[in-house]
Amino acid sequence: MRRIEEVLDGAEKICITGHIHPDGDCVGSCLGLYNYIREVRPDLSVTVYLEPFSENFLFLRGADRVDHTYPDAGPADVCLALDCGDKERLGASGKYWDAAKRKVCIDHHVTNTAFGDINQVCPKASSTSEVLFELMEEERITKETAECLYLGIVHDTGVFKHSNTAGRTMAIAGKLLEKGVSSSYIIDETFYKKTFPQNKALGRALASARLLLDGKFIAGAVTADDLRELGLLPRELDGIVDQLRVTSGVCAAAFLYETGEAGQEWKVSLRANDGVDVSRIATLFGGGGHVKAAGCTMHGEWSEIAGQLARLVEKQL
Ligand code: 5GP
Ligand code: MN
């Protein structure tokens, strides 16, 4: 695929969706594409379906029009799955995907299973937002579309600091800035700013952290009780694992939170420094992601899970 317009050919009804627990890149890419299609093809009917996401993203154009209720809807001519590595990660949107006449997957996860009829998967790209930029006609990207894509890139690169930040990423970010995006607003208000309970959760994760493998692996957790007490939702825990990862001497980090749905069930976020591929570890437990950032769900005591992960990291060292 060279241009997004190609896959819209002959279609009238378009559905856009992304992965469960939508993060900045997922929301940014879905809304960026939504705004772009409304600009270039105002004749089409477009709906975005996503699970509820951080209120920090609500300023993006179209955020208030995202459908979180998953109503029954007739089949779309084209369904686009963004930032989603496999069909299961579509969650409740899977029904729109199954019913759609043309299924298009646009992503950057190295573990992507190419589950679309058309797959535009670029593991070298920092973000799905970056992949989308390349599929858009630059002149037709409005300030509002640019804000969405810029936010996606900022979040998936950890503000241009992760190793997925290439020269091309910076060049694209520069072009988006020229559209009038407020970089400092997006970086401060949507990435760095934390509520008091979020900072407390970071504190609990750091206080619980254990060093394993002679300091080469770190793991920290927050329990379902912690989350209840702090009044936090899982989607408010972004960034904690990144603080664990920058502990000096560490090759890989894990942050776990108890999902509370099934007792002793933990959502695990993994991050790697050079020399470790955490996507391989996450895949062993039915998860996936990128070489340096991946996730999965695991069961048991969290300290045992940490030990199990440490042994898998050790094998790679
Ligand atoms: P995070 O730790 O920020 O939740 O996720 C890091 C990366 O791994 C993201 O790109 C995310 O999409 C991916 N990821 C996290 N959890 C899962 C999972 O359970 N399955 C798959 N396939 N990917 C995941
Ligand atoms: Mn992404």
Image: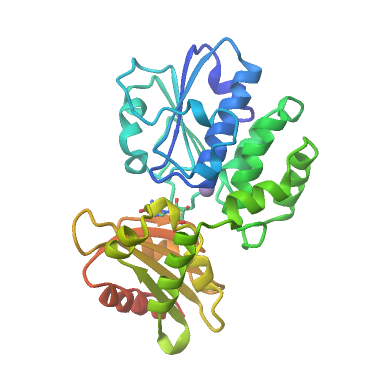
Residue 303, image x, y percentages: 29, 77
User: Going 49% across and 64% down the picture, which residue do you hit?
Assistant: 199
Which one is in front, 5 or 118?
5
Q: On the rendered image, what quadrant is the N terminus found in?
A: top right
For this orientation, the residue located farthest to the left is 262
From the viewer's perspective, tell me whether residue 27 is left or right of residue 180: left
* Quarter of image, res 32: top right
Which one is in front, 104 or 203?
203
Query: In the rendered image of this protein, does residue 262 appear above or below residue 45?
Result: below
* Quarter of image, res 35: top right
For this orientation, the residue located farthest to the bottom is 214
Which one is in front, 123 or 72?
72
From the viewer's perspective, tell me whether residue 296 is left or right of residue 279: left
User: Going 54% across and 22% down the picture, which residue do you hit?
Assistant: 7
From the viewer's perspective, tell me whether residue 219 is left or right of residue 65: left
Q: How is the image coloured?
A: rainbow
Q: Is residue 227 visible?
A: yes
Query: In the rendered image of this protein, does residue 49 appear above or below residue 291?
Result: above
Residue 156, image x, y percentages: 57, 52
Residue 51, image x, y percentages: 39, 38
User: Going 47% across and 74% down the picture, which residue do you hit?
Assistant: 252
User: Going 52% across and 32% down the picture, which residue do you hit?
Assistant: 63
Residue 66, image x, y percentages: 46, 28
Q: Is residue 277 visible?
A: no
